[in-house]
Image (cartoon, rainbow, N blue to C red):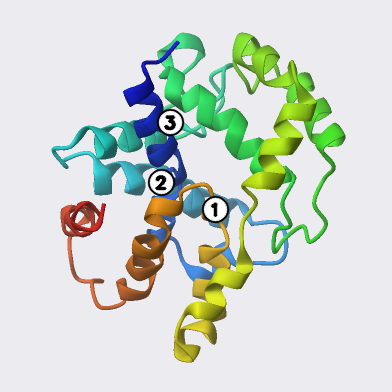
Amino acid sequence: DYPEEDLIILKKAVPLHDIGKIGIHDNVLTKPARLTPEEFEHMKEHARIGYEILKELPRKLPKVAAIIALQHHERWDGTGYPQGLAGEDIHELGRITCIADVFDALTSPRVYRPEAWTVEKTMDFIRAGRGSQFDPKLADLFLEDPDAISEIMTRHRDNPDAIRELPSSHIERKDRKGRLLQWKANYRAFDAPVILFFFLDPIMKKGSYLDYGMFIQSVM
C-alpha cells in the first residue's frame, strides 16, 4: 500500500520511464522491423540515459522517476537490463512499471508491429511471464480484474490528435512524432512540457544529462 501522496508522485513519474530515448538514434526508434543485435544494444542504453537525466534533481518526483527509468526493463529472473537485477533486488516501482509498460506496448500499435494485441492475448502473455519476466505477486494482482484494466486502458489511451496542435514544421518531423506517440495520455499535467522537451532537444544536444534534467524540472 502506498500513501496517497506517493501514488500521485508515482502517477507522474511512471510516464518518464522512457525519457532516455531522447539519446537513442531515430533510425533505431522508428525502424519498422526487428532490431539487429547491435541496434538492440544501443536501444538498451535508454534506461541508463534516463537515469542520468533524472538522478541529480533534488525533488522527490524525478528521483522516483530515475529509479523507474533505470529498472523498468529488469526481469524477475535476472535476465533483464541494464543491471541484471533479479527478484526483490529490483525496486518495486521498477517491477510495477515493467508490467504496465509491457501491457501498454503490446496493446498499442507500434512501428514494428502495426496491429495491437487484444487485452486477452496480452493478459495471457503476462500470465505466462509471471516468475520469469514479471514479479509473480504483482502479476497476479494485475491479472485479477481484466475488465478494470480494459476500462483504464480505454480511458487513458494515447491521443495522436494532440500532435495536430503543434506547429506544422514539427508535425512534418515524423521521427519526433513517432517518439511523442509513446508518451502516456494519463500524464496530462506533463504532456505539453514533454512535447516541448522533445522539440527543443536539437538545441540542447551539446548539453549534459544534468542540463536535460534541469530543463525537465523547470517545466514540472
Label 2, secondary structure: give it.
helix
- Where residue 23 appears, x then y in whole percent? 38, 60
Residue at image position (73%, 62%) is 33
Q: In the rendered structure, which disc, 1 or 2, sits on the residue that comes first in sequence? A: 2
Q: Is residue 200 left or right of residue 91?
A: left
Q: Residues within 10 Å of mark 2 (few under 14, many from 20)?
A: many
Q: In the rendered structure, which disc, 1 or 3, sits on the residue that comes first in sequence? A: 3
Q: Hey, which quadrant is residue 214 in on the image?
A: bottom left
Residue at image position (51%, 23%) is 95
| Cα separation between marks 1 and 3 | 22 Å
Mark 1 or 2, which is nearer the eye?
A: 1
- Give the answer, above or below, for where 198 lies relative to 11: below
Residue at image position (62%, 67%) is 160
Question: Residue tagged by mark 3?
Answer: 71
Q: Residues within 10 Å of mark 1 (few under 14, many from 20)?
A: some
The amino acid beneath tag 3 is: Gln
Q: Hey, which quadrant is residue 35 in on the image?
A: bottom right
- Where residue 108 appears, x then y in whole percent? 72, 51
Residue 95: image tag:
none
How many numbered marks, from 0 up? 3
Mark 1 or 3, which is nearer the eye?
A: 1
Q: Is residue 29 left or right of residue 122?
A: left
Q: Foreground residue, 166 or 103?
A: 166
Question: Residue tagged by mark 2?
Answer: 16
Q: Residues within 10 Å of mark 3 (few under 14, many from 20)?
A: many
Residue 185: image tag:
1
- Asked whether residue 131 is in view, the answer is no
Q: Foreground residue, 216 or 159?
A: 159
